Amino acid sequence: MDIDRFEKQTGLHFKDKKLLEMVFTHRSYLNEAGTTDLEHNERLEFLGDAVLELVVTDYLYKNFTNPEGELTNWRSSIVRGEILARVAGELELGEFLFLSRGEDKSGGRTRTLILANTFEALIGAIYLDAGYKDAEKFISQHLIALLPEIIEKKLYIDPKSRLQELSQEKMGATPEYRVMGEEGPDHTKIFTVGVYVNRKLLAQGTGSSKQKAETAAASEAIKNFD
C-alpha cells in the first residue's frame, strides 16, 4: 500500500508501519494469498471497537446530563456501521484495502461492513501506535463531530422503528424484511436483506447477522423519504 499517500491524506503518522498494513488486510486476501507475513485486521477491529465505545461514552457522560436511555441511543447512532462506513468512505479507506480478487470484483471496497470494520481497525491501530489521547482526538474529529446532525435529524432513533413510522405515514403499509442471500463460512457469514413496502423493494443492506442486515437495509430505505 502507499503508506505515504495515506498518511498525507489523513494527517496520521504511524511509527509502526506494520500496524497500518494490518489495518487494511482483509481476511479474504490472506485466504487467497496463502503464506504471508501479514495478519488480517479482525483483532485490531476488536480492539478499536472497544476504544471507540469508551471514547464516545466518556464524551457523552461529560457533556450531557440527559437520561441514560437517551445517551445510549446517541452512542449507538454514532458507532453504527453505516456511520462508520460513511466516515471511512470520506477518508477513502477502501482505496488502500488488500482484498481477494473475488471480494474486490464484488464491490468489497465500498461494502458497508468491510469499511466499518476497517475504520474500527484503524482506531485500534492508532491506540496501539500513539495511545489513547490520539485515538480520542481522531474519534472526536471524525465521529463525535457528527453528533449535532444526529440529534437534529433524530438519527438516533432505531432505523427499523423510524422506517416503520415513515412507511405507515407515507405509504400506509408496514415494512417487510426478506433474506436475499448469505455468503461465507458459518463463523463469518454475511447476510444480505431486502426491505419491502407494498411488495416494492426499497433498499437492501448487509451485516454479520440478519438483525444487523435488517438495520442496514432500514437505514438505506429511510433515505427514500428525505
Image (cartoon, rainbow, N blue to C red):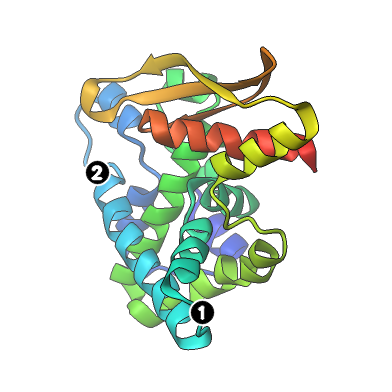
149 over 103 or under it: above or below: below
Q: Amino acid at mark 1?
A: Asn
Decide if residue 31 is on the left or right side of residue 25: left
Q: Tag 2: residue type?
A: Glu
Number of the front mark, 2 or 1:
1
Is residue 135 visible to the viewer in this orientation of the structure? no
82 and 195: which is toward the camera: 195
**Residue 110 at x, y percent in the picture:** 57, 35
Quadrant of the rendered image containing residue 195: top right
Reply above or below: 59 against 190.
below
Which residue lies at the image location 69% right of the left edge and 39% below the top edge? 222
Marks counted in the figure total 2
- Measuring 67% from the left and 33% from the top, which residue is drawn there? 221
Residue at coordinates 23% horizontally, 22% vertically from top-left?
A: 186
> Please, is residue 133 above or below residue 180 in the view?
below
Nearest to the observer: residue 183 or residue 219: 219
Question: Which of 9/170 is in front?
Answer: 170
Decide: is 41 above or below 194. below
Q: Secondary structure at mark 2?
A: loop
What numbered label is drawn on residue 39? 2
Q: To which residue does mark 1 refer?
A: 66
Q: What quarter of the picture does the C terminus occupy? A: top right
Q: Residues within 10 Å of mark 2 (few under 14, many from 20)?
A: some
Residue 21 appears in the picture as rendered? yes
- Residue 130: give x, y in percent of width and height: 35, 76
Q: Secondary structure at mark 1?
A: loop
Residue in view at x 53 percent, y 48 percent? 158
| Tag shown at residue 109 | none
Dot placed on the residue nearer the N-terminal end, 2 or 1 = 2
How far apart in space, not on screen, are marks 2 and 1 (Cα)? Answer: 42 Å
